[in-house]
Amino acid sequence: MIYLPDRQNNTESGATIVLGITGGIAAYKAVEVARRLMDKGIHVLPVMTDEAMQFIGPLTLSALCSEPVQSSLFNSTNPIPHTRLAQRANVIAIVPATANFIAKLSCGLADDLLSTTVLASKAPVIVCAAMHTEMWENAAVAHNIEILQSRGMHIIPPDEGKLAGGDSGVGRLATIDTIVEHIESVLHMVTGNDRSDSNTRKTDSNTTKTDSTGNSSGDHSAKDLAGYKVLVTAGGTREPIDAVRVITNRSSGKQGYAVAMNAYNRGAEVTLITTVDGVVSPDIRRIFVETAAEMEKEVLNYSTSADIIVMAAAVADFRPTIQSHTKLHRSDGIVQLQLEPTSDILAGLAAKHTPGQIIVGFAAEIGMDEESAQKKLTSKGIDIIVLNDITSAQAGFDSPNNEVVIMDSDGVRIEVPLLSKDTVAGVIMDVALTRLKDTRHYTG
Ligand code: CTP
């Protein structure tokens, strides 16, 4: 007889996760993911498919996790294990997710405990894909991934590296750090941490500072954006040079995602047009694009009905005039790249401005160059500009924090000190909402 250790009562964080393991060689890595989550005080419910058990025995996970492994839909003590799991989960993470399981999710199949649990749950789903390169690049898999993304599932794509059988390429499960970090972010989002804890004050001099904690009396649980439509862009666009190379920039999309989540938490109907994946509620409509032209097309599709538009994306100003559809080879020598300007989406939006609509742009500058930001505010004809210093060590591209100055076309100037991008997002939406109400008040 095998004795399992006493179950750890992992309720410290108050969070419960269903950890789904499907049948791939990377299944053994789920053990380390489970251990790390347990260490963080997260209650881990392991669910394995029959195929996963060909790769690792259930005993290790049963010993390590908060409860024993479940794998069958038919259980004499609990006739409906999938609904119990589905209801208890704050998040479902599938580590690894095989091509076959991704296809099942895409079709909505429910032929084992894990797929049935996903179908029965309203919890966010994180899919950590791992498979051979050819499978990952197969059009069917790519299509299924797009379907899952469009339903709001979080996809953690595979990394490049050594694969089963001695091959190498894209397909290796993302690092444990990446997976655990992503799970924590999604848990943070769904377990009720109200991130919109910022406040803005308008003074007589039209200049104000938020306090250094970003905390204040601003009560956004009141859903003050309910009934409004907010359109947000995020990430850096990618302009193809040839079939494999692109011109892009270092934007992470984090500030745009934070704005989208803040607006959503405050009750807005949110559309996010993005070049990058990130953590966001499945109820936000997300549209993935690559190039400035694609972003422009989608922005124009949704802009007319939007009450507030926040252009947080770093849009390329130039693209190669000619894009090769094949790969340019080193042996062909150095190519002279000819560039042509892209359209200025923000200026185009401002020109079409529907009455009472608020348009917010960003000014990515070297240093806190208020003069340059002010010029962009005026020349683009927008309502609000958010200035940030892209060279700042603490608030640069990939940082979770930001430090900005927000200016509007009425001369309001708000300095926001170094705070989380979530908090900065709250201040931006405060300013946009105040301006929206002012505008509508005066225009009737
Ligand atoms: N923007 C845009 N379309 C472009 C370039 C930028 O809509 N083709 C938007 C960005 O989303 C941002 C704002 O314009 O909200 C300012 O972007 P920024 O890169 O700071 O300025 P640019 O207008 O590109 O000018 P420069 O690169 O010369 O600073």
Image (cartoon, helix red, strand yellow):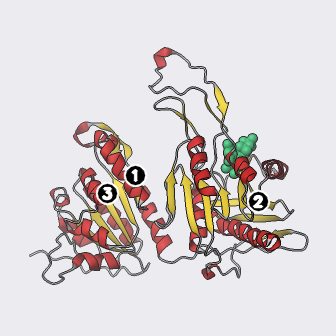
Q: How far apart in space, not on screen, are marks 2 and 1 (Cα)?
A: 34 Å
Circle 2: residue type: Ile
Q: Say which quarter of the image contains residue 128.
A: bottom left
Task: Tell me residue 154's x, y (percent).
Answer: 42, 59
Residue at far left of view: 1
Please name whichever residue, 399 or 149, is drawn nearer the observer in this view of the structure. 149
Residue at far right of view: 205
- Horizontal side of 306 relative to 328 (left or right) equals right
Contact between marks 1 and 3 (CB within 8 A): the answer is no
Q: Quick one: label 1 or label 3, which is nearer the N terminus? A: 3
- Horizontal side of 42 relative to 410 (left or right) equals left
Label 1, on which residue? 146
Q: How far apart in space, not on screen, are marks 3 and 2 (Cα)?
A: 40 Å
| Residue under the point 42% across and 80% down | 12
Task: Tell me residue 96's x, y (percent).
Answer: 30, 56
Q: Is mark 1 within 8 Å of ligand 1?
A: no
Label 3, on which residue? 106
**Vertical side of 334 occupied by 16: above or below:** below
Circle 1: residue type: Glu
Report the disc number at residue 384.
2
Q: How far apart in space, not on screen, are marks 1 and 3 (Cα)?
A: 9 Å
Task: Tell me residue 18's x, y (percent).
Answer: 32, 70
Could one spot residue 147 in this view of the protein?
yes
Q: Element at badge 3?
A: helix
Q: Element at badge 2?
A: strand
Crowding around mark 3 (Cα neighbors within 10 Å: few <14, some 14 to 19, many 20+) is some
Q: Element at badge 1?
A: helix
